[in-house]
Amino acid sequence: MAVSREGVSAAYLYGLTGEGRFAEASKDHYLTPGDGGYYGVSDCEMEPMLRSLAQVYDSGAFSLVQRQSLHQALLNTLIRNENEYWRAQDGNSIGGRHQTMGTSAFLSVTRFLLRRGNPNPEAQALLEKWQGECDAYFRNAATVFHDDLEGILSYHDVQPVLDYALERGKTGYFGRSGGFSLLDLAILRAYVSVDNLGYYCGTGPYEEARPGPVKAGILLGYLLAVRAAIQGDSEAAWLLRRFRGTQVGT
């Protein structure tokens, strides 16, 4: 089963306040993954679960034995999900939102266990294999400015790819060599897909299957903020401050 909302909330309350009672309140929620010994999380839930755990992992609430139980539950969760459709295993294609988000989540847990989990040689080899597969996926995804699909979710795919480029120092994603960078093209593509209030007005299965949603946003503000910070772009900074669309869905 997934970690309950109560456990996640208590973990973030500890992160905000530093009060040990919140870490203690969250502890049992992470130590009871389910009958199969893994967390029942989807591609949407895996990374948020890890983020919340990170709030209390070093709080002192977990004993060494309990940490080992956490590591085993996380490893079991990866084993359970390694062949899911949303976990890319190579760089042959990008796919869509499920693949970018799911592979990002899978890679986050893999890195955490390599960094903090003290894996035995067998687990180490498995984790390194998964990390290599996920890295191959994102190396490919960071060579273009959009995924393989079309629709509103396609515009959110830039975030995990951009995060990867930032974390791994993939300067080619931001660099300009006599023209536009990939980040520039991602921003321009997003900008022409929203109206003057910042709401998405492009095509895609979500919009065509659900007539009526006219106030859906995309992560335009995040892209502009990165461009303004990394490239010192005053135009991106101006839009970030003044265009309402940067506040929608960001």
Image (tube, rainbow, N blue to C red):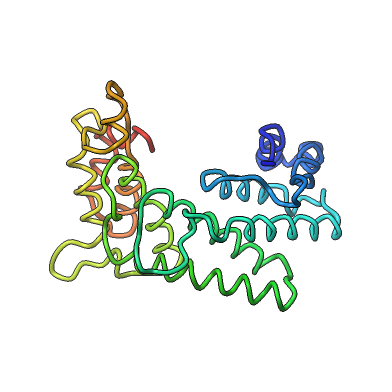
> Does residue 65 sit above or below 168 in this rendering?
above
- The percent position of residue 207, horizontal first and vertical second, equals 28, 31
Residue closest to the eye, 156 or 205? 205
Which quadrant is the N terminus positioned in? top right
- The percent position of residue 170, horizontal first and vertical second, equals 37, 69
- The percent position of residue 201, horizontal first and vertical second, equals 21, 32
Quadrant for residue 213, please give it.
Answer: top left
Residue plotted at (36% across, 51% down): 96
- The percent position of residue 148, horizontal first and vertical second, equals 29, 55
Q: Is residue 129 toward the left or the right of residue 118 in the image?
A: left
Q: Residue furthest top?
A: 212
Q: How many marks?
A: 0
Q: Is residue 197 toward the left or the right of residue 93 in the image?
A: left
> Does residue 233 sit above or below 8 in this rendering?
below
Residue plotted at (22% across, 37% down): 203
Which quadrant is the C terminus positioned in? top left
Quadrant for residue 100, please give it.
Answer: bottom left
Quadrant for residue 120, please give it.
Answer: bottom right
Q: Is residue 193 toward the left or the right of residue 222 in the image?
A: left
